[in-house]
Image (cartoon, rainbow, N blue to C red):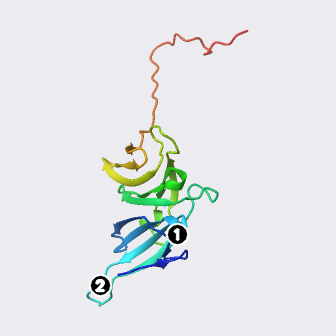
Amino acid sequence: LRYGTTGNGPGRFSGPRGIAARWNAQFNWYDVYVADTGNHRLQKLAFIPADLALNIPARMEYVCEWKTASSSADLLSSPVDVVVESDGSYVYLAVADQGNDRIVTYVDIAATTTGGATAPTWDARLGSLGNNLGTFMQVEGLCFLANGTDLDLYACDAHRGKVTKFEESPTPTIALSFVGVSTLPACFPPTSS
């Protein structure tokens, strides 16, 4: 099965470098995501396996494309890799946005609901240009790994020869218990006169 040609229209590519897929049991097809590097975008395709009983060959269909991160003014620049994983509730994508020295994450709501042509929604941005922990000089390969009910994201920085692990931080909580009489003044901090 061959799909796509060179160009910038739907289902056309310019130097694609990254590809990821996940089985979508709800629709009996693979959701396929392509980092279309030269066109500075991502494309989502559906790979529908052959149906031997009905003598229908396998096929690939264009679903949607997107170039934005957090807003219409925040554009991808040379995305080089994409990974996809589900945590059981949501389908997450992470994109190595090399031209912007960052990772952009998305949630693909359509992958678990309608299966329609709605582009995934922006979730978060990780990293920036730099030579410190959590920054990148040349973000390349990505990988999701399950960590209990969460997903950890590993990212390679080819220029520095480093791999960085990103994990979801716990939600901070503060619980206060007052027992007995407080030794603090009625107004704290004390006010001056």
Residue furthest to the front: 159
Secondary structure at numbered mark 2? loop
Q: Which image quadrant: the N terminus?
A: bottom left
The answer to which image quadrant residue 177 occupies is top left
Secondary structure at numbered mark 1? strand
Q: Which image quadrant: the C terminus?
A: top right
Confirm or deny contact between disc 2 and disc 1 (CB under 8 A): no
Q: Residues within 10 Å of mark 1 (few under 14, many from 20)?
A: many
Residue nearer the viewer, 122 or 77: 77
Q: Residues within 10 Å of mark 2 (few under 14, many from 20)?
A: few
Residue 117 in view: no
The mark lying in front, picked from 2 and 1, is 1
Say which mark, if any, is on residue 78. none
| Coordinates of residue 77 in the picture (x, y in percent) | 55, 58
Q: The residue under label 2 is which amino acid type? A: Asp
- Relative placement, left or right, of 186 versus 172 is right
| Coordinates of residue 163 in the picture (x, y in percent) | 37, 45
Residue 39 in view: yes
Question: In this rendering, is residue 179 above or below 106?
Answer: above
**Disc 1 marks which residue?**
65
Say which mark, if any, is on residue 51. 2
Distance in Å between CA atoms under marks 2 and 1: 27 Å
Residue nearer the viewer, 145 or 155: 155
Identified at 37% across, 58% down, the residue is: 86
| Coordinates of residue 107 in the picture (x, y in percent) | 47, 58
Q: The residue under label 1 is which amino acid type? A: Glu
Return the disc, 2 or 1, that comes first in the chain's sequence. Answer: 2
Identified at 40% across, 69% down, the residue is: 32
Residue furthest to the left: 53
